[in-house]
Amino acid sequence: MPKLARTCVIALAAALACGSAAAQERTVKIYGFGAKSGVVRIFGLNSEAAMKAAAEQINKAGGVTLGDGAKARIVIEYYDDRCNAEEGINVMRRIAAQPDAFVAIGPTCSNVAEPVFGILQKKAGDASDSGLQFPLYTDVAAKGGLASISQWSFRNVPNESAMYKSLFEWIKATRPEVKTVWGGVEKDFAHSNATFNAMKMHAEKTGFEVKGQSEWLLADTSFATQVREMRRGEADLVMISAHPFTTCGVLKEMQRQGVKPKMLVGLTSSSSLETLQGCAAQAEGILIPTSFAPVNPDAKRAADLVGAAGASMDLHNAAAWENVFTLKEQIERAKIMARPDTIQEDRRKMREALASMRETTGLLGKVIRTEDREADKPFLFVRAEKGAWTVAHTPK
């Protein structure tokens, strides 16, 4: 064979070999969904960024090992549910219809999570229940007790009732001059409304007098009436159960009307960069419990990597990051195959693996899994000081 022909044959063989190797490259799809548009879009955007950053780190370290021993790359696909219940149900059904989908992370909003959990099979293995048999591992939606709706639902969100119980006990012990409380609540948002009830309950149980409350909606932009009510209450402490957008609106109106309580307490979700970007001066001193802060090497590294992806890390997308790493471990433990012909079995195995977890690794330490598929996460209290979140106290 002439030298030129021989060279061409070798080149062709090499190209075919490369093409074959590329064709055989395995991928594992982890789906996510949440609010990427609307008033709370930043939470979904942050979760997507954290999921992709976590997957990139796993892939750089060699990927995930499948049940047949093959190595695979993790690929993230994230859908927008617009924090709308009907849209969330549609997204969940769309994901469940995919031949490569065996688990998903999400959603952002509790008012989406509740009905989405409701379309899942309530009791695993119940042949009389035609609900979706699909494991869902929630990162953000934090309204208490939602995982009890379905045995296919799992959450990695903090126990906010325990957080505010600890917070008010600490305030009682360290600030004896604070005796009265006024509440403010974003009434139409499931998370802020449910958490306000927990905040109010623990304030009263700890011995504070709750003198009244003001209410507003997530889309509101004027808070003059609510703050006038607050001013008449003359409480030592104002607790605001609202997301960054209306929290900042209320704090700015408090400044305008000269309302200056001795203490401010905020909602977990407002311990974020968005609050500081929107009203750092007015939020100065506000105290908030959170399940994330960059206080150790792992947490700092994760925050830096998510920051490099154009997002900021808070307690919500920190959970998204943790979920991706947890799923990598459970895929390997359950020997997931990630093939269209095994997808139904993979979903069942994934659910069983998640249900059998007793603890997971979180960015702040060990996360205990509860019998009702919820999480008992480490937490601390942060305070807004000079445009940054600083650690005020770490409960034992």
Image (tube, helix red, strand yellow):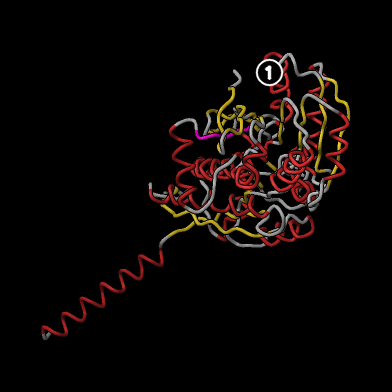
Q: Residue at x 65, y 58 (%)?
A: 36
Q: Position of residue 8 (x, y in %)?
A: 20, 81
Magenta portion: prevailing SS class: loop
Label 1 amino acid? Trp
Residue in the foreground of this view, choosing between 339 and 198: 198
Left or right: residue 201 versus residue 335 is: right
Number of numbered labels in the structure image: 1
Residue in the foreground of this view, choosing between 330 and 38: 38
Please tell me whether residue 1 is drawn above or below residue 52 in the rendered image: below
Q: Position of residue 9 (x, y in %)?
A: 21, 80
Please tell me whether residue 300 is drawn above or below residue 341 in the rendered image: above
Residue in the foreground of this view, choosing between 49 and 369: 49
Q: Position of residue 363 (x, y in %)?
A: 52, 34
Query: Is residue 288 visible to us here?
Result: no
Q: Alpha-carbon neighbours of circle 1 within 10 Å: few (<14), some, or many (≥20)?
A: some
Left or right: residue 289 versus residue 325 is: right
Within the image, what quadrant is residue 209 found in? top right
Quadrant where the image shows the C terminus: top right
Quadrant where the image shows the N terminus: bottom left
Q: Residue at x 82, y 48 (%)?
A: 217
Residue 274 in magenta stretch: no
Residue in the foreground of this view, choosing between 132 and 136: 136
Q: Residue at x 45, y 44 (%)?
A: 304
Please tell me whether residue 217 is drawn above or below residue 1 in the rendered image: above
Query: Is residue 8 visible to us here?
Result: yes
Residue designated by label 1: 170
Query: Magenta part of the protein: which range?
Result: 290-294
Dot 1 falls on a residue whose secondary structure is helix
